[in-house]
Amino acid sequence: MFYRFVTLLLLLVVQSPGESVEIRNRWHAGGERWLGAGGEPLATLADPEQATWITKRSGNTIQLRHEASGKWLGVAEGKPVAESDPINPTAWTMEQVTEEWIRLSAPDTGTLHIENNTDVVECGPEVQADWLSAMWRLVEISSREVLPSPDGNARITFQLANGMPEYLVRYGDEWVISPSPLGFEFENAPPLAGPFQVISSKQNVIDETWNPVWGQRASIRNHGNELVVELEEISTTKRRLQIVFRAYDDGVAFRYFLPEQPNLKDFKITNELTSFRFTSDATAWWVEDLHDTYERDWNETPLSKASVEGMHTPATFLTKNETYVSIHEASLVDWASMTLKCPQPGNSDLELKAELVPWFQSNVKVIGTTPMHSPWRTIQLAERPGGLIESDLIQNLNEPSAIEDTSWIKPAKFMGIWWGMITEDWTWDRDNPGRHGATTERAKRYIDACVRHGIDALLIEGWCEGWEGGIPGWRNMNFTTPYPDFDIEEVCRYGREKGVSLIGHHETGGDIPNYEKQMEDGFALYEKLGIDRVKTGYVTGDIPVYTEGLTPDGREHHHGQFMVRHYQRVVEMAAKYHIMIDAHEPIKPTGLSRTWPNFVAREGARGGEFNHFVGNPPRHCTILPFTRLLGGPMDYTPGLFDCSADETKRFSTRANQLALYVVLWSPLQMAADNYQAYDGEPAAQFITNVPVGNWDETRVIDSSIGDYIVTARRKDSRWYLGAITNEEARQISIPLDFLEKGSTYDVVIYGDAPDADYATNPIAMAIHELSMNQGMTLDLDLRPGGGAAVEIYIHGDDVPKPSGTAGNITPSKPYRLLAKHSDQALTSNGADLSQTATPPTNSQLWIFEKSGEDTWKILQGDQVVEAIGSDNGTRVTLAAPTDSTGQLWKLEHISGTQFHVVNAASGKLLDVEAISFSNGAPIHLWERAWSPSQVWSLEPVEPTPVPAED
Ligand code: NOJ
Ligand code: CA
C-alpha cells in the first residue's frame, strides 16, 4: 500500500513536467511505426491512438511512461519491456542521428531497435548508426480531431505533430494512411507547413441528394461529415491556412484553402507537401506520368516497386488487410494535375508524395493569388473492388451544375468516319489523292448506316483545312473552313432529314494560341449548323503543347496549370454555344462534369485506337474501371467487330467488345468500326439496344482488378450486364438476385463461342436466349480475352432480338464489292478487273452462283472472274466460263458485309495491287496479308438494276 502510494506520488511528479509524445520508428516497411507498451516480447504498434507516452527528461536522458497502461519502458534480461511499478524506471540516453531522428539506448544493454522485418522491439550493442529501425522520433501531438464517416467505418484524423499538420486515415480496423504531412513550399517565401496553432475548428454534416444530368444512377446522395480547421503560423509571419476534411462512408478527402491575408497574396507553389504514407506494401495499379500523356499501359506492382518517375491518378491499391484504396483528386480547377511519386527507389517508407505537374521548365507548379482553393485530395475506400466504382465521392466533392438549362445536354451513341483514319486506310488530310476520309459522299453513307443501326450521331474527323503535314504538325487548323470535298451544310441537312446529328471535331494539334484565337468562331459555326457535340484533340506526339505568345517559354505540359485552365475555358465557351465536349488527350476527369455537365466524356487513357497502334492487352479493360474511370467517363471507342484485321494486334473477342458498352462507363459511346463490319450482324443488335448515359442504377456484381469484372446497369425495368476477362478463360456464375420477384425475364446472351479466343479466334460468338427469373443463376463462360454482353428484360417487353444474315450470300442477286481500304468498287472493262471510284454502274455489279460445296462463281453478264496462275501478282480477269478451278472462289466471312474472296485453285486472295487508292488500280491475287485491300464488302444492290453508264 505504502509503495503504491509512493509510486503514485512519483507518477504525479513525473507527469507534471512531462510532455505527451508518440514514439515513431523510422523503419516503415511493415507499417508499424509506433512504440507501444504491449506484446510479449515488446512490439511496435499499428495504432497511434494507443501509442502515447509521458516523458521525463534530464539532460540527454529520458524516462518514458506509457499513458494508457501506466507502464514504464525498461529492460529485463537484455530485452526491452514495459514494466509496471519499477523501483527505478530506465533512463534512456538520447543521441541525435539526423536532424529529425534519435537513437535511444539503455545503460549496459544497447540501442532500441526493431528486430529484422518483424514488429518485435529489441535492444542490442551491435546496432549501426544508419539502421532505420533504430531511429526514433518523439512527436508531441496536439489538436487531434477525428472525423468519422456517417457509418463510422471510415475516419480521417487531423493533428499537429510538433506543430506540423498531419492527417491519418483509418478504414474499419485498418490504419490505411499513417501520419502524412500537409502544406506547401513557395518560391521566394518560407514554406507554409508549420509550426501552426489551431485557431478554430468546426464540424458540419453534409446531406443532400442531387440528380445528375446523366449518370450511372438516377439520383446521388452526398452524405458526409466535414471538419474545417483554421491554422495560424506560430512564427511572426502569422500566415493562415485552412484545411477542409470530409469523411464519407466510401472514402475521405481534404482540400486546402489559402485565405486572403496580409502576408500571403500572390504566390507561386513549388511543392505541395501532401503525402500518402501507406501502412503496408499494397498492390498498386498505376500508369506512369510523363506530364504530357496518360496513354500508357497499366502496371500492377507492389507499392514499393512503383515508379519513382511518378504516376497519374486515379491510382488504385489493395492493402495487406484487403482494403481497396484509390487516390485521386476532385474538382481540379486552376491548379496543376496531381501525380504521385515514390520519394526514393525501393520506397521503404511506402510513401506516395503529391507531385504537381510543373510549368514548363520551371520549379513552379501553381501560380495564384489568395483567396484560393486547391482541388480535393481524395482517398476512396472499399471492402470490395466494385465498391470503388459504385462510389460517388469524386462527383460529390464538385460544385452543382453551373449550367441552368441543361435540357440540351444528352447522352448519345455515335459512329464515325474515324477507324479508317486510325488504321491508316483513309486520311484526315488531302495529301494523298483518293484517300481523304471526310467526303460528302461517305458522310451520307455513314448517316444511312447510323439510321440502320439506331445510332444517334456521326463523328466526322478531318473535315476542315489544316491537316496537311501529319503529327506533330497539325498546327494550322482552320476551324471554320471545310475542305472542298466536304459540303458541311449539305451533310448537316442530310443528317437532319434522317434524324442523325453530327459530332464536330476540333483537333488542335496542341497549338493552343491557334485554337484559342478561333474556338469561339468554331463553336458559333457549329451551333449555327445545329451541331451540338464537339470532339476536341490535343495530339502532339506526347510532347508539351505549343503556347507561343501566351507563356514565356512557348511550351507547356498537357497536365500543368496552364492547360487545366485551357480545358476549362473550352468547356465554358462550349456551354455558351450549347455544345457538349468530348476531349481527347484531355486533362484527367475529376468529377467536374457535375458542374459542367456539357463535358460529357473524354479519352485520357489508351482507348480502342491502341488496338491498331500496339494492341491493348486484354487485361487493360479489366483495370480501367478501377482506375482512370473512377474520375469520370471515358470515350474508349469500343465495338471493333473486325477484331482479327491483323493477327499481330489481337486484343479481345467480339463478345468482349460488346460487354465494354456496359463495363466502361460513358454517356457517349461510339460504335467504332466501319459500318460495313456491323451490317447484317446479329451481334450489332446489342449496340442498337444498349441504353447510353442515363442509367437508373449501376452495380458491380463481381470483380477482381486486372482479372475480370461483371457490371450490371438498369434502365427502367431492363438490365444490361457486361462481363469481361483478361487473357484467362473463366466461368462466372451470376446470382440474379437483383431482378424482381414474380416476373419472368427474357435473357439474351451475346457471348463467346466455346472456341473463341482473342489470339486465335476472336470473332466467334454464341448468341442465345434463355427464360429466367429472380433467384436463378446465370452462368457465363468467358473465353481468353473474352466476355459477354447480356440483356435482361421482362418477358413481353418489346426489345428487338438479335437477327441478321451476315455471312450469307444470296445467289442471283447483284452485289457491289467495295475494297475496304479505298471504298472503291470492283469493276470490269469486259476483260480486266480494277477498282473504280465511279458511282454505281452495271460494270460494278456481280452475281454469285454456287458451284461446288463451298465454292462460288462470280459472274458479270455471261462471263466469270478468273485467275490463271497462282503466283503473287497473278492478274484477275473476266473470261468465258470453263471447268477451270481458277474460276472458283471461296467466300470467307469476316464481319458484317466484309469477306475475303479466296481463289480455290491457289488459295490466294482477291487483292487491289499495291493497296492502291488510285481510281482504276488493277486487281490481282496475293497471299493472305491481313491487308484491307483484301477485304471486300459485299453490298447488295437494291433495287436492281443499277442505271448503266457505259
Ligand atoms: C487522337 C484521338 O484519340 C483520335 O480519336 C483522333 O482520331 C486523332 N487524335 C486525330 O484527332
Ligand atoms: Ca488519343
Image (cartoon, rainbow, N blue to C red):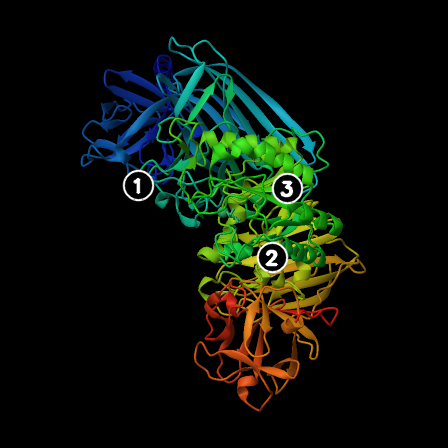
> Can you say which quadrant of the picture contains the C terminus?
bottom right
Name the residue that disc number 2 marks. Answer: 659
Hey, what amino acid is under mark 2?
Answer: Ala
Position of residue 530 relative to residue 129, above or below, is below
User: Distance between the Cα atoms at labels 1 and 3?
Assistant: 45 Å
Numbered badge on residue 224: none
The residue sitting at the right extreme is 796
Q: How many marks?
A: 3
Give the residue drawn at x 59%, y 48%. 484
Hey, what amino acid is under mark 1?
Answer: Pro
> Can you say which quadrant of the picture contains the N terminus?
top left
**Would you say 225 lies left or right of 145 here?**
right
Residue in front for this viewpoint, 654 or 417: 417
SS at mark 2 in the image: helix
Give the residue drawn at x 73%, y 68%. 942
Considering only order in the chain, which callout, 3 or 1, is on the residue closer to the N terminus? 1
Name the residue that disc number 1 marks. Answer: 345
User: Distance between the Cα atoms at labels 1 and 2?
Assistant: 39 Å
Considering only order in the chain, which callout, 2 or 1, is on the residue closer to the N terminus? 1
Q: Position of residue 434 (x, y in %)?
A: 53, 58
Q: Position of residue 257 (x, y in %)?
A: 50, 20
Position of residue 582 relative to residue 711, above or below, is above
Within 10 Å of disc 3 (Cα), the crowding (few <14, some 14-19, many 20+) is many
Name the residue that disc number 3 marks. Answer: 533
